[in-house]
Amino acid sequence: MPEPRRRVRRGRVADAVALERPRTRLAARKLKEENQVGEEEEEKEVMAIGNDSGGSNKAAAQEEEGNTAPFPERVQVGGSPLYKVERKLGKGGFGQVFVGRRITGGNERSAGASILEVALKFEHRTSKGCNYGPPHEWQVYNTLGGSHGVPRVHFKGRQGDYYVMVMDILGPSLWDIWNTSGQAMSSEMVACIAVESLSILEKMHAKGYVHGDVKPENFLLGQPSTSQEKKLFLVDLGLATKWREGGGGGQHAEYDQRPDMFRGTVRYASAHAHLGRTASRRDDLESLAYTLIFLHRGRLPWQGYQGDNKSFLVCKKKMATSPDMLCCFCPPPFKQFLEIVVNMKFDEEPNYGKLVSLFQELLGENPAIRPINTEGAQKIIFQVGQKRGRLSIGEEEEEDAPRKKVRLGVPATQWISIYNARQPMKQRYHYNVADTRLAQHIERGTADGLLISCVSSCSNLWALIMDAGTGFTNQVYELSPVFLHKEWIMEQWEKNYYISSIAGATNGSSLVVMSKGTAYTQQSYKVSDSFPFKWINKKWREGFHVTSMATAGTRWGVVMSRNSGYSEQVVELDFLYPSEGIHRRWDGGFRITSTAATTDQAALILSIPRRRLVDETQETLRTSQFPSTHVKEKWGKNLYLASLSYGRTVS
């Protein structure tokens, strides 16, 4: 079956606990008495969030359809002729498409606005795509409609509860063709689709838009038995967004990541779309790569996942599947294409000509007898030939220089260590510390005037950083067999201690450090089975900021505090170390203030301090062993360990 499209907020959350430090001791006692009730209420709220995310929510879809008004039998909008609404052609992300037959005038040979049959796309006024006005898709068609590979919209307007577009009627989708031809396509057929799709996307991108939902169901051929029956079209622009601000000379859209937002279709979406990153041209091309491989092979390795965490599992599988493995039954151009597009930078301009040329060897020599019209691609090939004629050999070689590959499909776990510039101070580290040895290291450090600034864990052993620059006046800690022992934390809150560092082990135990002398005025924490970005975003709006993070196995623990000293925070979450995102955040004035990782994902919190630092230098390292040698080298440059975690870094 075709893969359903999603535009939902998501979060794979279960068995979650959120706890907040009460403002008064009376409130603390009351909270303690009602603690069990509070836990149950929080669990219900979190499960509701989980049910609204990932996976297919058929019940919700049926309810939405049942609550909408019936479709009109006749349509006339925006000065159009009168059309009779006939059979249903299909359903898009936000609307449904029917055949419209002109009641008076027009004939079989008519074209354009006077054609006898048209496609009528209905979108209910309460649809998410409408947002209290005409559908977003209308704005996109105003810019793109009628351009290469995009159907023309002849009329649009509102009738009753529906917004209606009158469009050219087209033929079968690539999914239809694939499904009726043995669920596999020849190399030549898919190569024709590849080059013509690239020519369509190039024109769309040139006008400042990315499609956002490239998949076989959204590529349609022209009507059978017409001059356009072999012409390829890209439809359903409801998720299209601008990758460029303003007109042709506008700046690239600003990079951001919202891990709770997903746009597109799970099967074909880019890894960046799964992770909630701002859409850019690379995402359309990665989705196209998965579309081509699917059409040729008949299946993708991540098909079959179900449930609320479907998007998480699919993204994990995508990033763990190397181009070699994914394209092992495809001709070489498929792998070459995939390797290029999955390694593109956020704002990188695609070399469409080079991408088209990859598939040339699979195309038949005579364009007239190819299964798909490749007229648009032929223009790109001609332009590439002209450009190469003007380039010197040296320039061509530079363009084809090898690039660093970031998606290798080889998982690894490493230490992630963060170093900040500080005035010279005393710092001490211990690693591979067993539970029984923890107390003596802490007591010895405290005797020397050092307090704990950071804790972490690897293989159920602890890493401990102590230094003289914490600013804390007193400190307590607890080693607990459970992840973030609630009762002990609440007791320390009553004594005006605040959580300053946490760590969790793979066996579920935790080390919690609480300090006096912090600037915090209120604190809250959450334990969750997935990274709790929804909760973090909610607390940001309430004036909290993340001040500590840790993981225990696959569980996340996040601590947020008021009066943290930060003015703004962002998250970088990935199935590998998010190097590009970190560098973009650094350029925007952010610095890493917390990090944590599971065996699947790494998360980094980056913050802008309210008071500008005298020296903003920050460096990061990834090492397979604890970075003891590197720490000493950094000390020589007055760079001190500020944050530490162990987990997934490479995919």
Image (cartoon, rainbow, N blue to C red):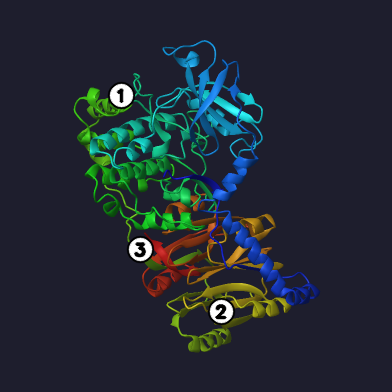
Residue 135, image quadrant: top right
Q: In the image, what residue type sits under mark 2? A: Val
Q: Secondary structure at mark 3?
A: loop
Look at 48% across and 43% down and name the residue there. Answer: 279
| Tags 2 and 3 touching, CB below 8 Å | no
Between 23 and 121, the residue placed more toward the observer is: 121
Counting residues from the start of the chain, the first of labels 1 and 3 encountered is 1
Q: In the image, what residue type sits under mark 3? A: Pro
Q: Secondary structure at mark 2?
A: loop
Q: Which mark is residue 411?
A: 3
- Judge left or right: residue 328 versus residue 594: left
The residue that mark 1 highlights is 375
Task: Residue 88: give x, y in percent of width and height.
Answer: 50, 31
Look at 53% across and 58% down and name the residue there. Answer: 591
Counting residues from the start of the chain, the first of labels 2 and 3 encountered is 3
**Residue 516 in view of the camera:** yes
Residue that protrudes farthest toward the right in the picture: 26
Q: Is residue 570 above or below residue 129?
A: below
| Tags 1 and 3 touching, CB below 8 Å | no
Q: Is residue 478 above or below residue 375?
A: below
Between 511 and 212, the residue placed more toward the observer is: 212
Task: Residue 155: give x, y in percent of width and height.
Answer: 55, 20
The residue that mark 2 highlights is 482
Counting residues from the start of the chain, the first of labels 1 and 2 encountered is 1
Task: Name the quadrant of the N terminus.
Answer: top left
Q: In the image, what residue type sits under mark 1? A: Glu
Q: Residues within 10 Å of mark 3 (few under 14, many from 20)?
A: some
Task: Residue 536: give x, y in percent of width and height.
Answer: 61, 59
